[in-house]
Amino acid sequence: MDRLIYIAMTGAKQLFERQAVEANNLANVATPGYRAVVSAMRALPVIGPGAATRVYVAATTVAADLRPGPIMQTGRDLDVAVAGEGWIAVQGRDAREAYTRAGDLQLSSSGLLQTRTGLNVLGDGGPITVPPNNRAAIGADGTVSAIPTNTIPNAVNIVGRIKLVNPRPTDLERGDDGLFRLKRGRVSPPDGRVQLALGALEGSNVSMVESLVDMIGLARQYETQVKLMQTAENNGRQWSQVMNLSA
């Protein structure tokens, strides 16, 4: 009886956590450049004294869904989308180089080119800074130019170039912050073949319909596990009554 309880109990717990993963995906259905998290479940033996006759259910984050999202035209000067394969290099909160597809960029009060979440966009030599009294213009190859706003507008100065990379998908791992990094702390070299679509953003690759269907399916599986635990409890109670009668 305890085998059934063990499997149903751990199954319900992991299904509850998978629901949280799907809920997070659904919450980011409108987040630019977001990549859906893919999770799965597997059975593992319980390690301990005695015979290895018990198993439990464990959930694991298999990978991220790296399929591209839809490209949406915004017309905003600092909105860029990676055209095809590739990533934009940014400086994560841990000061490590990381990669994102979110191209809704902005200038900080000090002139730093940043993502909407405040991460510094990296150039070939570090963060990119636009001088005061200038607006930024971004080229398809990632070149960032400073255009004066108080003098002749055709006096354009190149202040940097966004680092665009294209590592192999198998070399990437997703962090808890939603950014991607190369395994073992490595960094990717720039790839001149990566191009940007200007005045556009790449949307999330989460399908609202698929996520809602998955949420419903997980809820039904969770209910099944709970019913199995209730069945095991009832069977145990009935077995106890039979043993009392036989005594």
Image (tube, rainbow, N blue to C red):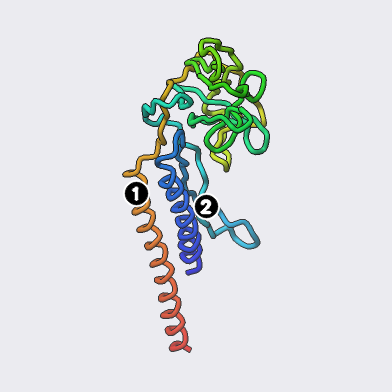
Name which residue lies at 64% across and 25% down.
127
Residue 71's spot in the image, x, y percent?
38, 27
Residue 68's spot in the image, x, y percent?
41, 29
Of residues 246 and 99, the one drawn nearer to the viewer in this rendering: 99
Between marks 1 and 2 in the image, the one whose residue lies nearer the viewer: 1
Q: Which residue is mark 1?
A: 212
Q: Which of the two labelled residues, at mark 1 and mark 2, occupies the earlier sequence position?
A: 2
Three-letter code, disc 2: Ala
Name which residue lies at 50% across and 51% down.
43
Left or right: 87 in relation to 122: left
How much space separates mark 1 and mark 2, taking CA atoms? Answer: 23 Å
Secondary structure beneath label 2: strand
Q: Is residue 98 above or below residue 218?
A: above
Q: Which residue is mark 2?
A: 58
Secondary structure beneath label 1: helix
How packed is label 1: few (under 14 Cα within 10 Å), some, or many (20 or more)?
Answer: some
Numbered circles on residues, count: 2
User: Could you say which quadrant of the image residue 185 lies in?
Assistant: top right
Q: Is residue 113 above or below residue 239?
A: above
Residue 175's spot in the image, x, y percent?
58, 39
User: Could you say which quadrant of the image residue 50 lies in?
Assistant: bottom right
Of residues 244 and 232, the one drawn nearer to the viewer in this rendering: 232
Left or right: 122 in relation to 26: right
Name which residue lies at 39% across and 31% down.
69
